[in-house]
Image (cartoon, helix red, strand yellow):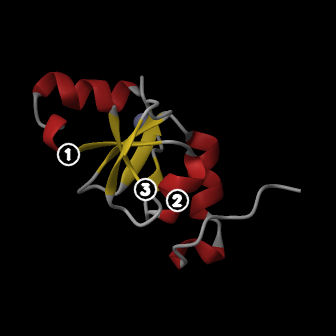
Amino acid sequence: MYTLTGLDGQPYPSPSPGTLGGHRRGRLYGRLDCPSALRAIARGGYVGQRVFFADEATAIAAGYRPCAVCLPDEYARWKHDPRRSSRRPAPPPA
Ligand SMILES: [Zn+2]
């Protein structure tokens, strides 16, 4: 079993691994192979704060924002989204 972070920001057990990683204290989510996250992990300062999400909608609902390094498009969208203070997931693009 894997431990993922749910819509409410709380951990829950999951039979499948997440598709996105995140930093709990930084409220950031990004790719599992994010160079910025991997650098931080290599320094040893990240592992205790590492969380995982099943998908992007869950990460957003949990109150996380996209990483500017590995998800520049998502980050730009987040930055310009007036609803970003909402904890609800954004609707899918039309
Ligand atoms: Zn990243």
Q: Spatial distance from mark 1 to mark 2, Cα to Cα?
A: 17 Å
Q: Is 32 drawn above or below residue 71 in the view shown?
A: above
| Lower position in the chain sequence, tag 1 or tag 2 | 1
| Disc 1 residue lies near ligand 1 with CB under 8 A | no
Which residue is the site of mark 1? 49
Q: Is mark 3 on a helix, strand or loop?
A: loop
Tell me how far mark 3 sits from mark 2, CA to CA: 10 Å
Under mark 1, the amino acid is: Gln
Front disc: 3 or 2 = 3
- Residue 91 quadrant: bottom right
Q: Where is residue 92 in the image (x, y as percent from the top left)?
A: 77, 56
Furthest-left residue in view? 44
- Look at the picture and state if 28 lies above or below 89: above
Distance between mark 1 and mark 3 Cα atoms: 15 Å
Whether the residue carrying mark 3 lies under 8 Å from ligand 1 is answered with no
Give SS at disc 1. Answer: helix
Give the residue at mark 3: 6
Quarter of the image holding residue 3? top left
Q: Circle 2 — which element?
A: helix
Which mark is nearer the camera, 1 or 3?
3
Residue 22, position in %: x, y?
Answer: 36, 44
Q: Residue at x 48, y 53 (%)?
A: 59
Compared to residue 37, the image places residue 22 above or below, namely below
Tag 3 and tag 2, C-beta contact below 8 Å: no
Q: Where is residue 76 in the image (x, y as percent from the top left)?
A: 61, 52
Q: Residues within 10 Å of mark 2 (few under 14, many from 20)?
A: many
Q: Residue 60, which numbered label? A: 2
Q: Who comes first in sequence, dot 3 or dot 2?
A: 3
Q: Are marks 1 and 2 in contact (CB under 8 Å)?
A: no
In the image, is 51 to the left or to the right of 56?
left
